[in-house]
Amino acid sequence: MQNGTLLAAVDLGSNSFRLEIGRFEHGHIQRVEYLKETVRQGNGLDENRNLTQDAMERGWACLARFAERLAGFPREHVRAVATQTLREARNREEFLTRGSALLGYPIDVVSGVEEARLIYQGVAHMLPQSDERRLVVDIGGRSTEFILGQQFSANAVASYRVGSVAWSSRYFPDGAFTPQAFLAAEIAAKAVLDEALSVFQRDAWEVAYGSSGTAGAVGDILTAMGGPKGLITRAGLNALQEKLLRAHSADRVRMEGLKEDRRAVIGGGISVLRAVFDLLEIEEMQVAQGALRQGALYDLLDREQPETDLRNATVNALMQRFAVDTAHAERVAATACALFRQAAAPGSERAERKLEWAAKLHEVGCRISHSDYHRHGAYILDHTDAAGFALPELHRLGILVLGQRGKVRKLEADLSDASFALQLICLRLAVALCHARRAPDITEMQLRMEPGTFTLKIPSRWPQAFPQSAHLLQEEMVAWQKTPWELCVLAD
């Protein structure tokens, strides 16, 4: 990454969408521009957990405006991340398909724990270097993240389905503030967050930080009330709640420091924050400057090189957890990647890295069942918490793992995507060629890709020398029949 490079992160939160543009300079990212729009998608989920048309239209309109500012940014310099509302929405694919097209960049829905990890990276990079043990709390619109960390390492992460938008609509639906409503909201929040006590107890951290919207809004109000800048105290929260109760309703609240876009969700945000203070025995919390969007920017830097890409370590950890035969996994990965490089277009390094991960994890389901290990492997990847990965990335790896054997035409995948089709055939060929759990000699093999056709050239003597492998290649040609692709194996 060269000094002066512009990077951008888009945070699709439940309350607001944000665009952060930064310039990379000597290992750090300096803010160039920041845009925020209150979209309140979290209020747009109906009783069936589908986004309403109005909620989708609000989001699409915002993304279209962001796209104008992002015009000309290379794809690898932009990261768009969606959180709890789109994790919940059953019709999220409809929103994401059009939203990605309007924005001009793919939108990654991240798991709660991955959101927490990115939040911590954003906070840590905006704080002075210190060995202090930190608790970071991020109260979003529909989820709250807890992180224990030190320096740039997040040592424990958790995400809970409680947030300012959700709690405001549930416990203050008409905007009325009553002691009973606050009590019910705090009790309900504690019930959800109670399990955090086993990990995030008071002796596990030294300094508490609050990041993102709710903490920032409360910090601004308390500062305007005469409190220390950037500090939230228990006494300050009590005083703030008293002010809300005296106002009786959200539309009558008049407080210096309270921005208009926070008025409708301030009741839910304060009730959750008070519950966090009580539960984790917090006396004071510092308002952090960093948040998810800064973490996404720094994650772009880490993803640029394989040696700093956290996803490599995550894949290795999954291999260990599920007792994968490491030697064989690396053998299959090396074979698949060698074939991929023969046929891929220049600039396909990222696709090759993802193929390598799928190959290393192709037997991750063997610990559950040997006969159906590909199905179990795909299930594991679709349902695991994997640091560094977005949910669509894990799903795509899962499809590759599922598709390593069997009929290709029965695989629910977009085979019109030439890059994916190439990844899939390289993995399938590698699994077949490594069937004896030995490294195959592919030095004289050549894989080529043309529109609708894969051609694998093998030495003329090869079928006689390796009859079982030749038989498996014949079966592979049959497997690709009735798909948009044809596999030809030519002995030359």
Image (cartoon, rainbow, N blue to C red):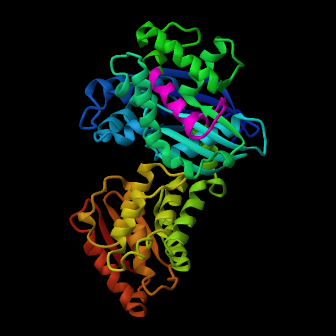
Q: Nearer the viewer, residue 326 or 366?
A: 366
Quick check: can you spot residue 400?
no
Q: Nearer the viewer, residue 330 or 18?
A: 18
Q: Quadrant of the C terminus?
A: bottom left
Q: In the image, is residue 191 above or below residue 254?
A: below
Indicate the position of residue 232 as horizontal and vertical percent values: 64, 25
Q: In the image, is residue 342 above or below residue 219?
A: below
> How many numbered marks are there?
0
Q: Nearer the viewer, residue 391 or 207?
A: 207
Indicate the position of residue 115 as horizontal and vertical percent values: 52, 43
Indicate the position of residue 198 as horizontal and vertical percent values: 56, 52
Q: Residue at x 55, y 74 (%)?
A: 330
Q: Nearer the viewer, residue 346 or 106?
A: 106
What is the quadrant of residue 54 in the picture?
A: top left
272 displayed left or right of 57: right
Quick check: can you spot residue 25?
yes
What range is drawn magenta here? 267-294
Indicate whether residue 293 is drawn in magenta: yes
Q: Quadrant of the N terminus?
A: top right
